[in-house]
Amino acid sequence: MPPRRRTPAFAPPRGREDENGVFDQDSSASGSSSTLATTPKSKKAPSTGMRQKMKARVDELEKEIEEISVKLKKEDGHYKLFAPGTPFNEIDLSESSFFKHHDHHKNTSDPPKSWKSWLFGRKFFFPAGVFFGVVIALWAMDFTALPTDMKDIWQALPTALDPRDLLANLTMVEGARKALENRDFTVGEELVATYGLEKHHPIILIPGIVSTGLESWGTQSVAKGFFRKRLWGTATMIRAVLSNKERWIQALSVDPETGLDPPGFKIRAAQGLDAASEFIQGYWIWQKIVENLATLGYDTNSMDMAAYDWRLAYYNLETRDAYFTRLKTKIEVMHQHNKQKVVLCSHSLKWVESDPTENGVGGGGGVAWVEEHIESWINVAGTMLGVSKAMTAFLSGEMRDTVELHPAGSYVLEKFFSRRERAKLFRHWPGASSMWMKGGNRIWGHHEAAPDDPANATDTHGRFFSFRHPDVPTDEAGLTKATVSPNLTLDDAGPYVLTHTPPAFQRMMEMNYSCGFETDEQKLKENDRDHRKWSNPLEVRLPEAPSMKIYCLYGHGKETERSYWYMQGEYEHDDTRADGAEDTAYCDASDPSNQCDNSTTQRTALDFPLARKHWIDAAITVKGSLPEVRSGVKFGDGDGTIPVLSLGSMCVRGWNGTTKWNPGGIKVVTQEYKHSPEILDLRGGAQTADHVDILGATPLNAAILKIAAGRGDLVTQQIGSQIFQYTAKMDWD
């Protein structure tokens, strides 16, 4: 073991003190295994003061370096540390587990350990005590006194553990290794090496609903604490919800009458590439696409993020923020600066053509603007014809993610953020209404069948809402025409949801959105002037831009909620009154301008409750049914959020070729990606096709990079679902 040097603590040095108080150090060292380094005496001027003497002695001590020899020996199977000349002259290390000697050749003279020494040792008594303590506690527990939710948890625990399951999981080790590999920049680097791709067309990324971060700019007293904080996105949102949920809801809600900011609050979309790169730290959204584009040479001069306040209806988005005007200008600047047409990923283009003088709204670009400025539109997992879960969110504040929670989790969620609160918040986001399902029965099916029903179906997605009568058994045999009513198709379900929402929400829908199906070419032309139609591809035409290309890129193969079983409850007052609380209204005395004493007032006579409680009938789970029914949700094919019918119908049928909805014959290329997640990757890995996680998938990133680099010819049609069979069953004429 090498010698270790140390500087001794302050102590009187050995030697003779001269007349000046300076020690003359001995040249010899005591101790057989340690030596003391010698230093020549330094000549100093005589020091008379105590401070000078002390300084001289410290200077001499600092020059002393003591060298100690330490040896580690093994004697009789024990390790010992020898440090002669120190207080630790000899230390036996055999009690240390690190130095304990495990001899393969056991000494036969050692007495064998008996079973009694193990039985009465602490290695047995401690775990045995823990085990018997748990057994006694469970034996003494009265499970009949548990809450219902806790009983459900107990019944859900596994009754047996099969060791074969553990052995089978050993095959996941390779998957774990792959999941931990860093895939940053790899897609771009491989394409550069294979095809020599480089920056060509400037690209503008346009996030989807709820992707953009929202931050507060209000300075009034109710909003000062939120100033410049992200109330949607980042961990600040989570802290705001947990610390002051009511204030957070108030800030994020849009005024139901004006469709703009509520009094006292000012929420705006974050800007730049960071606006939708990550939702919260570590949970990326567009970050992977930005990284891979950068490997081709893209930067902020050739790539941008057109973030927007997704809570607003499109009309108000332009009215308040001039969003579409700014987007049009941004496209023109990038086109001029980069000398190439722009790639959009992804949004509708109808607004930019409209003449604001003639139609009251629009960018005034004219019919030639798109042809001159837009190279391609990349439609990534677009909600073209709507989302099933949007209908349930507006009706009851639910979706599959909430109803499939464990009863204990559902109980906590309901106590913290009830169905009624969630539904109210969704209804205060007019922009989310763009996900309302479009096309009615012609697209989504009727009472007897739907285009995407599986073969030999025992039920149909055409009955979008099915209501089980109270006290009717949930087994399949008990669910008959006599015990289930009404069965609502989409033509019926849309008006039903509107009927059970506040009048302000109904007015907002009427003024901003349309969800019909238009086949008359003359009316399609007229709809070019009606901004309510522009978000529905079935009621408006694509621009007449024959050189432009559309790429529909989306996933399939993941079970997706498609239709529902529901229950109806008693009637209740709706949330049209901002100050409503249960069945009373109150005057807020905290505001002196109200001139009230905070007394309550009963509702007026004949003010009947017109809304009705609804909830997904989670009790219905029919094993082996076609389509599958679980927790009141009927599942179909899709990307986990949007059904395939909505993702692909316009791409492979409505816009395919020169049609009523595509008069310019814009080329449409569709690529579907089969959902093949890596088990141990929380975001699904390189081959995921989940609605959000697909933004980090290798095939999608590769397609976007090829299109931006001017090699869209490398992106060819790829269909894996039954979308062609589905669209063949729809009524397009």
Image (cartoon, grey):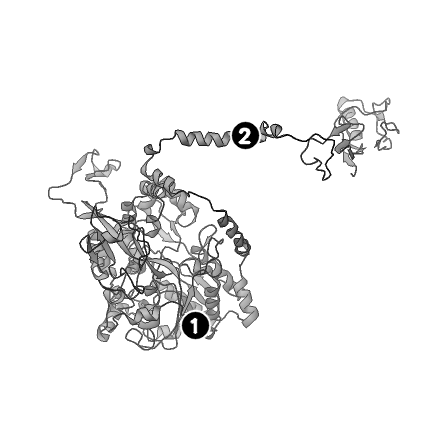
Residue 263 screen position, x and y as percent: 28, 47
Tell me where residue 668 sits by quadrant.
Answer: bottom left
Residue 6 image label? none
Q: Nearer the viewer, residue 520 or 439?
A: 439
Q: Secondary structure at mark 1?
A: loop
Looking at this view, is 111 or 581 the one in front? 111
Residue 431 visible here: no
Image x and y of residue 517, in percent: 24, 68
The residue lying furthest to the left in this view is 605
Left of 465 or right of it: where is 292?
Answer: right
Q: Secondary structure at mark 2?
A: helix
Q: Indicate the quadrant where residue 641 lies.
A: bottom left
* The C terminus - image quarter: bottom left
**Circle nearer the viewer, 2 or 1:** 2
Screen quadrant of the N terminus: top right
* x and y, in percent, of residue 279 in the image: 43, 52
Q: Residues within 10 Å of mark 1 (few under 14, many from 20)?
A: many
The residue pinned by badge 2 equals 126
Q: Is residue 668 visible?
A: yes
Is 607 displayed left or right of 690 in the figure?
left
**Mark 2 is on which residue type?**
Phe
> Is 160 located above or below residue 633 in the figure?
above
Q: Is residue 31 left or right of residue 535?
A: right
> Mark 1 — residue?
341
Residue at left offset 47%, top offset 29%: 133
* Residue 39, quarter of picture: top right
How far, Cα to Cα, is label 2 from label 1?
Answer: 74 Å
What's under tag 1, amino acid-wise? Lys
